Image: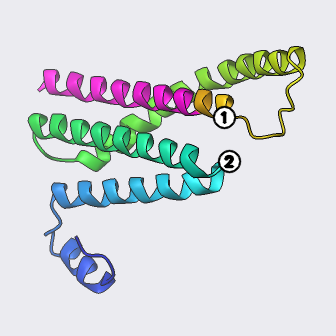
């Protein structure tokens, strides 16, 4: 994997020498780096909660991407990134449509619970942090499972 030498990478791509596996490595590295940035940007509580969310996200991402890559290899080992981004876009849009009303409903329940129990929603709350981490982990797992299922259907069609 080339980290800094853009000319060397451009030459490799121009000479059609960049393999699917190398493309996968760039996707995996980019995904982990993005998770790292998001963990720090989105988590206001910091500390162990942020570390736990980051670790869980990285583990799920590594498992999901590796599984998808392996299933793609069983198809024909070609066009991984093209298939991955196309399938992920459609599944992402479907999940986004489901997530909007689900988030509204959960937000209403969260607000009602907070008011009923005199909880200041603007103060850090470890219990809600755990709920958030769990929700994100489950949602991410569902997303990867749906993508894997789609890739497996492609494999069956070959």
Towards the viewer: 27 or 123:
123
Element assignment for label 2: loop
Residue named by callout 2: 45
Q: Earlier in the sequence, mark 2 or mark 1?
A: 2
Quarter holding the C terminus? top left
Image height of 31 relative to 113, above or below: below
Element assignment for label 1: helix
Residue 42 place in picture, x, y as percent? 64, 50
Would residue 93 be found to the left or right of residue 126 on screen?
left
- Which residues are drawn in magenta? 133-158
Towards the viewer: 107 or 145:
107
Image height of 44 relative to 130, above or below: below
Give the dominant element type of the magenta stretch: helix, strand or loop: helix
Would residue 58 be found to the left or right of residue 63 on screen?
right
Q: Is residue 144 magenta?
A: yes
Quarter holding the N terminus? bottom left
Hey, which quadrant is residue 99 in on the image? top right
Towards the viewer: 4 or 46:
46
Residue 126 marker = 1
Hey, which quadrant is residue 7 in on the image? bottom left
Question: Mark 2 and 1 residues: CB-CB less than 8 Å, in contact?
Answer: yes
Residue 142 place in picture, x, y as percent? 42, 24
Residue 152 marker = none
Residue 143 place in picture, x, y as percent? 43, 29
**Which residue is pictured at 25% across the width and 75% down the height?**
2
Query: 10 Å neighbourhood of mark 1: few (<14), some, or many (≥20)?
Result: few
Hey, which quadrant is residue 117 in on the image? top right
**How far apart are the two marked residues, 2 and 1, measured between alpha carbons?**
8 Å
Query: 10 Å neighbourhood of mark 2: few (<14), some, or many (≥20)?
Result: some
């Amino acid at each position: 994997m080339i980290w800094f030498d853009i000319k060397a990478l451009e030459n490799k791509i121009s000479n059609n020498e960049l393999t699917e596996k190398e493309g996968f490595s760039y996707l995996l590295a980019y995904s982990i780096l993005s998770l790292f940035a998001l963990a720090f940007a989105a988590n206001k509580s910091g500390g162990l909660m942020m570390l736990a969310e980051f670790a869980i996200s990285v583990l799920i991402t590594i498992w999901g991407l590796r599984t998808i890559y392996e299933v793609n290899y069983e198809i024909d080992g070609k066009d991984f990134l093209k298939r991955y981004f196309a399938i992920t876009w459609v599944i992402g849009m479907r999940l986004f449509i489901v997530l909007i009303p689900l988030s509204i409903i959960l937000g209403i329940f969260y607000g009602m619970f907070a008011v009923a129990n005199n909880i200041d929603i603007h103060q850090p709350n470890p219990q809600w942090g755990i709920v958030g981490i769990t929700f994100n982990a489950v949602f991410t797992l569902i997303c990867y499972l749906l993508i894997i299922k789609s890739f497996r259907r492609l494999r069956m069609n070959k």
